[in-house]
Image: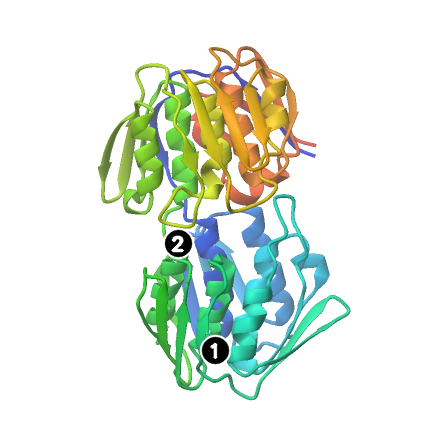
């Protein structure tokens, strides 16, 4: 199992190119099932989750060509409509094949994804929406089995904001007969990117970027070429790297228009930020200030940035109150940060972070994707050497993170397991 050895690395300076967003690429890759024509995606990150989905689609009969950051798909000869447990259990986003399979082929058999380290994340809203569109759904031996001659448009009000639920129902609705209205939809930029891609393929979606999506069903979709939106979470992670190390980083190909809440919190912490349509520069000349935050659905502060921002608060001047409202078990990085000298009190979903002037290198263990990133950030600030174990989590969502950070002055070594 690979490890990262992170050495004390302050004053990072230079440029980092932001990769395409994993959470945008995954549903759009699944959208390739909606057409018999070729779908070409550019700016696709080379990540473990992408390779897992490539394997899943390949097993269904989709021809996939992935070279550099370009993926080409041909789903004209799909022969298998089953997403097996062996793959779905490793990546919850595999459930996103459910909507496209039912919409185009009238049948799908997808393993229930179960829980994950940071919370249960049920799929009840996916099932409720598909049933509203006329699908017959049963749960049999751990699999969702869905069938429909053709889905029908429906007015669906989701009980909670769910990103993957919105994406699954959106992909199902584009080939349904008639109009579908999705209320209380997720507004994340990754959902918006999927909608734009679907419209390029011939879908008729309006209300993009709002919490009410209106979809006029069409008989078929055609091929298209689409550039995956920049990863706002990766960009936010590197922005915090600049803040923690009192550095000066310019993030090229970033999309500041998707990062409003992150930028606002960094500015309150004392960072000087310059932004353009496709770049973000973050400069920190002094110890950051403690900043309170609450995680909420977009456009509020994202749960996927909570762990990284907690690390920043760990070394800030003052005390910060952090509240996690999205996932019930997303403070598993706290004991690891405390091993490095952080001072954090947790009570339920509230974390009180008392800033300290110094962290110290230690052997720590990654518990999930974003927790992994928070420990790498802490390791750069810490005195001495930090070893981050179980970084397969990190490789699920960050493309060559140690190379990108080393290119701007970090000292991080990957040890192959």
- Dot 2 crowding, Cα within 10 Å, few <14, some 14–19, many 20+: many
230 vs 115, left or right, is left
The residue identified by callout 1 is 36
Residue drawn at point x = 58 percent, y = 34 percent: 331
In the current view of this chain or complex, which residue is farthest to the right? 141
Element under disc 1 = loop
Q: Secondary structure at mark 2?
A: loop
The vertical placement of 406 against 197, above or below, is above
The quadrant in which residue 417 appears is top right
Question: Measured from the top left, where is residue 104 in percent x and y?
Answer: 52, 80
Quarter of the rendering containing residue 102: bottom right
- Which residue is found at the position 31% from the left and 45% from the top? 255
Q: Is residue 78 above or below residue 227?
A: below
Viewport quadrant of the N terminus? top right
Image quarter of residue 251? top left
Q: In front here: 398 or 313?
A: 313
**Foreground label between 2 and 1:** 2
- Which residue in the protein does label 2 denote? 188
- Kindly give the residue lying farthest to the bottom in the view shown: 149
């Amino acid at each position: 199992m690979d490890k990262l050895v992170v050495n004390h690395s302050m004053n990072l300076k230079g440029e980092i190119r932001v990769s395409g967003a994993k959470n945008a690429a995954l549903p759009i890759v699944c959208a390739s099932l909606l057409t018999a024509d070729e779908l070409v995606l550019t700016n696709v990150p080379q990540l473990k989750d992408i390779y897992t989905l490539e394997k899943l689609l390949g097993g269904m009969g989709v021809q996939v060509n992935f070279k550099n950051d370009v993926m080409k798909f041909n789903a004209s000869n799909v022969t298998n409509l089953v997403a097996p447990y062996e793959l779905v259990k490793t990546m919850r986003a595999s459930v996103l094949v459910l909507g496209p399979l039912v919409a185009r082929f009238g049948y799908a058999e997808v393993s229930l994804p179960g829980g994950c380290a940071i919370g249960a994340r049920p799929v009840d809203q996916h099932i409720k929406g598909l049933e509203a569109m006329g699908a017959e759904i049963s749960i049999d031996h751990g699999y969702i089995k869905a069938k429909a001659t053709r889905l029908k448009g429906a007015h669906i009000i989701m009980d909670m904001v769910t990103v993957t639920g919105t994406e699954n129902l959106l992909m199902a609705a584009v080939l349904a007969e008639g109009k579908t209205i999705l209320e209380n939809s997720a507004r994340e930029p990754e959902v918006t990117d999927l909608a734009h891609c679907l419209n390029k393929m011939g879908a008729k979606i309006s209300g993009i970027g709002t919490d009410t999506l209106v979809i006029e069903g069409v008989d078929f979709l055609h091929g298209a070429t689409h550039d995956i939106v920049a990863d706002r979470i990766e960009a936010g992670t590197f922005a915090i790297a600049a803040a923690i190390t009192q550095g000066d980083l310019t993030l090229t190909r970033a999309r500041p228009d998707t990062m409003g809440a992150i930028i606002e919190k960094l500015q309150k912490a004392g960072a000087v930020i310059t932004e353009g349509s496709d770049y973000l520069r973050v400069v920190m000349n002094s110890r950051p200030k403690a900043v309170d935050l609450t995680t909420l659905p977009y456009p509020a502060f994202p749960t996927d940035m909570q762990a990284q921002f907690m690390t920043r608060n760990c070394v800030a001047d003052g005390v910060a109150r952090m509240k996690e409202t999205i996932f019930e078990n997303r403070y598993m990085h706290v004991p690891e940060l405390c091993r490095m000298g952080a001072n954090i009190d947790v009570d339920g979903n509230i974390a009180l972070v008392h800033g300290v002037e110094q962290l110290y290198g230690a052997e720590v263990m990654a518990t999930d994707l974003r927790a992994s990133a928070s420990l790498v950030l802490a390791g750069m600030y810490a005195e001495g050497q930090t070893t981050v174990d179980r970084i397969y989590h990190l490789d699920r969502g960050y493309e060559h993170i140690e190379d990108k950070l080393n290119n701007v002055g970090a000292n991080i070594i990957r040890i192959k397991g």
